[in-house]
Amino acid sequence: MKKRIFAQSRLRAPGYSLLEVLVAMAVFGFGILAFMQLQGHLNRVNLDARIRTMAANIAEEHIEMQERFTRLASDAQGVGFAYQDIDDDTTTLTRGGIEFTIQQTVTDYYWDADSGQFSYTATSGSVFSDFKHLQVSVTWASPEFNRGDSTGTSVGRLGSGDLQVSTVISSKITATNHLALLDELAIQGLCVPMVTCL
């Protein structure tokens, strides 16, 4: 009887059964699928962050361009960008293969010395508003991540979005556009030569 038990134990060679190998392969396969999904998600998040950074840069560049006016009133030749030229506007540009739409909404504010408050309407004797409030919206639609429903109709885009930035631009003398006020004073003949305005 001892010989028979010893003989059976010698027949089982060390190693893995077919069932153990199949279970291990299934666990490994699920792990690979999860990793691939994670990698795809990380790629989408990375692209979205890159596009949002580009949109923020575009908004900042747009606002800086608006702040660089060289005079208050529009000139007849339309050569110099003026404070008066800052108005509602919509433009598009392509950067990095993605089309961005820049929409600018401008609200004029006038200082009313009698009430001591700002208003939307021009006060008597005011030629230009004291401040312009700019609301800049940068929108984009990334074509790389179109989503669709079961019929193939697009229901949205991953990677699409918008960015809102606002700022206030003054018609008064500032470090960036100090020549505008000096130019306007010279046009009105209040100080000639302009050096005396300093």
Image (cartoon, rainbow, N blue to C red):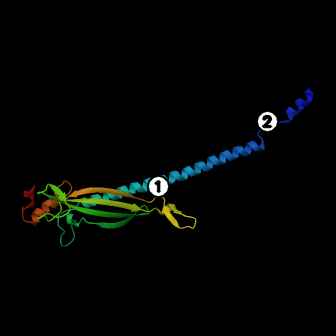
Q: Position of residue 106 (x, y in %)?
A: 26, 63
In-image side of 13 versus 140 (left or right): right
Q: Amino acid at mark 1?
A: Leu
User: In terms of secondary structure, where does tag 2 sit?
Assistant: loop
In-image side of 108 versus 150 (left or right): left
Q: Mark 2 or mark 1, which is nearer the start of the sequence?
A: 2
Count of numbered circles in the view: 2
Quarter of the image containing the C terminus? bottom left
Nearer to us in this view, 179 or 33: 33
Q: Which residue is mark 2?
A: 14
Q: Position of residue 49 (x, y in %)?
A: 43, 53
User: In terms of secondary structure, where does tag 1 sit?
Assistant: helix
Please give the name of the residue rendered at 74% of the width and 42% of the height, measured from the top-left corner: 20
Nearer to us in this view, 138 or 193: 138
Instruction: Say above or below: 190 vs 39.
Output: below
Q: Which residue is mark 1?
A: 47
Q: Residues within 10 Å of mark 2 (few under 14, many from 20)?
A: few
Please give the name of the residue rendered at 36% of the width and 60% of the height, measured from the top-left corner: 138
Q: Amino acid at mark 2?
A: Pro
Q: Residues within 10 Å of mark 1 (few under 14, many from 20)?
A: some
